[in-house]
Image (cartoon, rainbow, N blue to C red):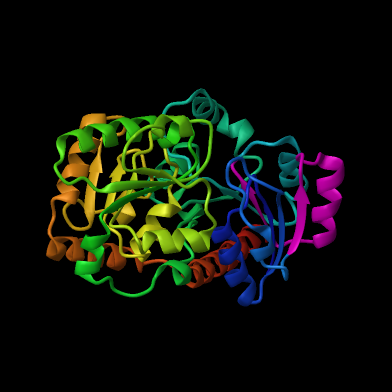
Amino acid sequence: MRIAVLMTGLTAYQDTCFRALSDLGDELLLVHPDSMAYAPFDKSRFAHSLQRHVWATMPGPEVLQPLVERFAPDVVIMWSWDGKGYRAVMRSQRDRALRVMFTSNFWHGSAKQWAGLLAHHVYVDPLFECAWVPGERAERFARRIGFGGGDIIRGANSADTELFDRGPRDADELAERRRFLFTGRLIWHKAPAELAEAYRRYRATTEQPWGLDVAGGGPLAGAFEGIDGVRLLGFVQPEQLAELMHTSSCLILPSHIEWYGVVVHEAAAAGLPLICSDGVGAVPHLLQDNFNGWTVPAGDVDELAEAMARMSALGAKRLGEMSDGSRALGSRLSPQIWARNLHEELERQVRKRAGNRR
């Protein structure tokens, strides 16, 4: 198949997944910005074999429509439902290609979501035939804006598991690391200020507190300044992040809103116990309370500090069991599984579409 993908950002793990899709014989055109705010991935590591159109400012219809028409796709996938140029492409491909919306949104009642719910007959239905979602929360949102169960492709996000999975962790080694790890952009919805305050309280009430590594950049980095035990590392490339995960004892992701959170899959593959907020979309798939970690209420600083204290008080045996639990849950998806699923589901949807048009 020939698949055009219109993206609002490209991460290293997504590039790895698209490379796996290309390995199945699909021809790809990736249209994406040249950078993401506070996430300067090393683009030299991206697959050079994939056809791309990289932009600094989103092109208009006069650029995008001829570009996609020359590629002659069987499928066009668009990130979300916004962007004048991208929407024009989807309209122009109505009689030519299967049109798919990627969405990781889950319902939280924003003005944009209410607009989509109230106006999906005008704003969503004319542009898309299928929705591609990472998990059950996003699927519920897709159904809410008009997609039926037969119009939904699941499993839209996967970590680069080969990079992060180095096999079972030694329980004693895991316990000896004595470090929490947070990784993500230091912006409001990731809750860095709440994490900083929770860690300050945890450290004040724990006799032998673990350290905290903060891997990421952004405007709220100052929340961690002056707190003992914190190492501010800035943005790290995926290879460095994999090393950090193997020198840590637990991942913390306390986000207010995290549409999915592939970092949770990366940490699970690396065998880390997890502490995540209930605002993280990946939680239903990758975190089972008391099996491989705990879920805490988003924004609740006291609950987060208490979970850190519980985690750091565990012995090696229990930490090892949680590590094995994370690896078991993380093994459900990989770039190869991701690619096979997407390839076969798109083939099925294309056949269904052809049958409906006879």
Q: Nearer the viewer, residue 124 or 17?
A: 17
- For the point 52% across and 45% down, the residue is 103
In the picture, the quarter occupied by the N terminus is bottom right
Left-right relation of 258 to 118 = left
Q: Looking at this view, is 111 or 96 the one in front? A: 111
Disc tally is 0
Can you say which quadrant of the picture contains the C terminus? bottom right
- Where is residue 345 shown, x and y percent of the image? 53, 65
Determine if the magenta segment contains residue 59.
yes
Q: Residue furthest top?
A: 111
Q: Is residue 170 left or right of residue 347?
A: left
Q: Which residue is nearer to you in this view: 179 or 66?
A: 179
Residue 333 % position (x, y):
41, 66
Q: Which residues are magenta?
A: 51-80
Q: Quadrant of residue 245?
A: bottom left
Judged left or right of residue 197, residue 26 is: right
Residue in the image at 79% along x and 54% along y: 68
On the image, the x and y values in percent for residue 272 come to 30, 60
In the figure, is residue 109 to the left or right of 73?
A: left
> Residue 170: x, y in percent?
24, 72
Q: Residue at x 22, y 47 (%)?
A: 294
Q: Is residue 349 above or below residue 33?
A: below
